[in-house]
Image (spheres, grey):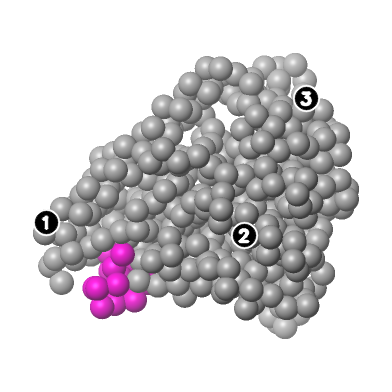
Amino acid sequence: MKASKLNTQLSQIQESATVALADRVRKLIAGGQQVVALQTGDPDFSTPEPIIEAGYWAIQEGLTHYANSRGLPELREAIAQKIKTDNTGEYNPDTEILVTNGGVHAYYCAVNTIANPGDEIIIPDPAWMTHVNTVAMLGCIPVTVPSYAENDFLPTLAEIEKRITPRTKAMVINSPNNPTGAVASYDYLEQIVACAKRHDIYVISDEVYEYIVYDGLKHVSMAGFRPRYEKLIIINSFSKSYAMTGWRIGYIAAPGVVISLALKASQNTITNVAAFIQKAALCALTNSDVKAAVRVMYARYGQRRDNALRMLGEEGSHIGAFAPKGAFYVFIDIRDMGFPSLTIAERLLAEAKISMVPGSVYGSCGEGYLRMTLAASDKAIEQGISGLIKWANSL
């Protein structure tokens, strides 16, 4: 079959670099090679036992058939209550919450709902590549806005304003950020909301790392800016906060008019999220033992982050890092090494058997960095950093 007969938009989108790298590492390990795998954002902690039990008992009770395509009413109630308690936002669970098949699906439904082909979506650079690829896949135009370490990897308002045109439909905010670990303050987000209001555009706020913050910071959710501005779409997931990456469940919180269309996008892609998975998610939000377990997990990420920065800052290391304020990655600064990040990542894997993601896959402003996950064992992180430093010093 000729490529010209296939979908041209999909043909122009690159395969997920992190997924491709993870597959490559698995093949190396299966072939008998020892690799320090620090490329994937998948918690190394098990899903808390009460969540697993809730899913199991839901299956035993027969919740294996089609479910409400908006999401189980009791789960939407719990999500609305969580947003009210933790994010100071008010959402009607009947009309303003949609349960989705993970955060990626939530983002897809959101963009599909508010944008038409040819519309522009502003996305910070560096960016999680799915933010860019989904926009392009739907026939819209991703417009990237640069951010740099000296500005805490948060795009300046002036740079955002320069990129807004009559075709701009929305801007994307991802705080805490993947890949940089940047965290937006209340004052910064207030400026973003004011900008969106001036130009009558949506803000899509990806908040999947909301509970993983450091240095005593507290995540600020866009949900708290209602009812001051209504064109706010909150994207969230259970994957990172509850070590539930394989369960594939998330949600959108947005005005009813957005949810009513997002529901159509969801119904015509996944029909509904499995009811037993929704029961597990309900347990995640309401069970006190789960909350205690994930607090331990978040603290461990903080300890790993501090240890990683300490090792990278020690004498003899000529490699620095942007100190993440949230999420579970370290954006390692390799700009002084004199090679593109892709070259460094390829050689690091081939010569030192250490796998990290080249920053260039996250955009031009990611060039000169490697993304290292903290969602790996303490031993793997220490081996990876010490191995990276030793390898770099040998060049």
> From the viewer's perspective, is the residue at label 3 or at label 1 nearer?
1
Q: Which mark is residue 74?
A: 3
> From the viewer's perspective, is the residue at label 1 or at label 2 nearer?
2
Q: Which residues lie in the magenta part? A: 333-348
**Is residue 255 visible in the rendered structure shown here?**
yes
Q: Is residue 260 above or below residue 79?
A: below
- Residue closest to the eye, 37 or 69: 69
Cα distance between the residues tagged 1 and 2: 40 Å
Of the numbered discs 3 and 1, the one sitting upstream in the chain is: 3
What is the x, y in percent for residue 172?
Answer: 64, 61
Taking the image as shown, residue 5 lies to the left or right of residue 131, namely right
Q: Which mark is residue 191?
A: 2
Q: Is residue 254 above or below residue 355?
A: above
Label 1 sits on a secondary structure element that is loop
Which amino acid does the dot numbered 3 rest on?
Glu
Q: Main secondary structure of the magenta part?
A: helix
Q: Is residue 339 magenta?
A: yes
Q: Residue at x 29, y 43 (%)?
A: 306
Q: Which mark is residue 315?
A: 1
Q: Quadrant of the N terminus?
A: bottom right
Q: Which mark is residue 110?
A: none
Q: Residue at x 77, y 20 (%)?
A: 62
What is the x, y in percent for residue 352?
Answer: 22, 60
Q: Residue at x 69, y 32 (%)?
A: 84
What is the x, y in percent for residue 152?
Answer: 43, 60
Q: Quadrant of residue 280?
A: top right
- Residue closest to the eye, 19 or 168: 168
Taking the image as shown, residue 359 lies to the left or right of residue 280, namely left
Which amino acid does the dot numbered 2 rest on?
Gln
What is the x, y in percent for residue 305?
Answer: 33, 44
Label 3, residues with CA under 10 Å away: few <14, some 14-19, many ≥20: few
